[in-house]
Image: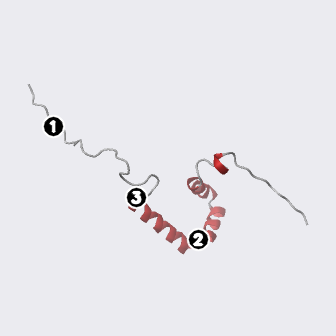
């Protein structure tokens, strides 16, 4: 008969209220990378640079837009999005 092997996994730890990073917060590596990308964008011209890229390379630009937009858009208090369009000629 083979002796029972002990697991290297301890019974300590596990899910505890308040343990770990808050939901949605970035780890330090991701936060640093985002800061670097923001700084590079600022040095490249910011909004003006993005506008030029949108015209010269629309497909990759729209891919970027898809990544930064919220996945689901809701209106006030979680309801439907309300909008109106007003056109004036003068």
Frontmost residue, 56 versus 51:
51
Please rate how many residues cluster around mark 1, counting C-alpha atoms within 10 Å: few if below 14, some from 14 to 19, many from 20. Answer: few
Q: What residue would you read off at disc 2?
A: 46
- Residue 76 in the image, given as x and y percentages of width and height: 67, 51
Circle 1 sits in a helix, a strand or a loop, which is it? loop
Frontmost residue, 56 versus 14:
14
Please rate how many residues cluster around mark 2, counting C-alpha atoms within 10 Å: few if below 14, some from 14 to 19, many from 20. Answer: few
Q: What residue would you read off at disc 3?
A: 27
Question: In the picture shown, does residue 6 fall above or below 20?
Answer: above
Q: Residue at x 60, y 47 (%)?
A: 72
State the image quarter where residue 32 is shown.
bottom left
Separation of disc 3 and disc 2 at Cα?
25 Å
State the image quarter where residue 2 is shown.
top left
Q: Residue at x 36, y 53 (%)?
A: 20
Relative side of 51 to 67, left or right: right
Q: What residue would you read off at disc 1?
A: 6
- Residue 56 in the image, given as x and y percentages of width and height: 64, 63
- Residue 48 in the image, given as x and y percentages of width and height: 63, 71
Q: Of the two numbered discs 3 and 1 on the same chain, state the one appearing first in sequence.
A: 1
Q: State the residue lying farthest toward the front.
A: 17
Please rate how many residues cluster around mark 3, counting C-alpha atoms within 10 Å: few if below 14, some from 14 to 19, many from 20. Answer: few
Relative side of 60 to 11, left or right: right
Separation of disc 3 and disc 1 at Cα?
33 Å
* 1 vs 2, front mark: 1
Q: Of the two numbered discs 1 and 2 on the same chain, state the one appearing first in sequence.
A: 1
Question: In the picture shown, does residue 61 fall above or below 44?
Answer: above
Circle 2 sits in a helix, a strand or a loop, which is it? loop
Q: Residue at x 28, y 46 (%)?
A: 13
Circle 3 sits in a helix, a strand or a loop, which is it? loop
Q: Residue at x 19, y 42 (%)?
A: 8
Frontmost residue, 43 versus 16:
16
């Amino acid at each position: 008969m083979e002796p029972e092997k002990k697991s290297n996994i301890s019974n300590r730890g596990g899910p505890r209220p308040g343990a770990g990073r808050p939901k949605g917060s970035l780890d330090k590596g991701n936060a640093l990378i985002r800061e670097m990308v923001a700084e590079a964008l600022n040095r490249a011209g910011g909004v003006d640079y993005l506008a030029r890229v949108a015209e010269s390379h629309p497909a990759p630009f729209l891919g970027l837009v898809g990544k930064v937009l919220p996945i689901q858009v809701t209106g006030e208090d979680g309801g439907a999005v309300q909008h109106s369009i007003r056109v004036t000629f003068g």
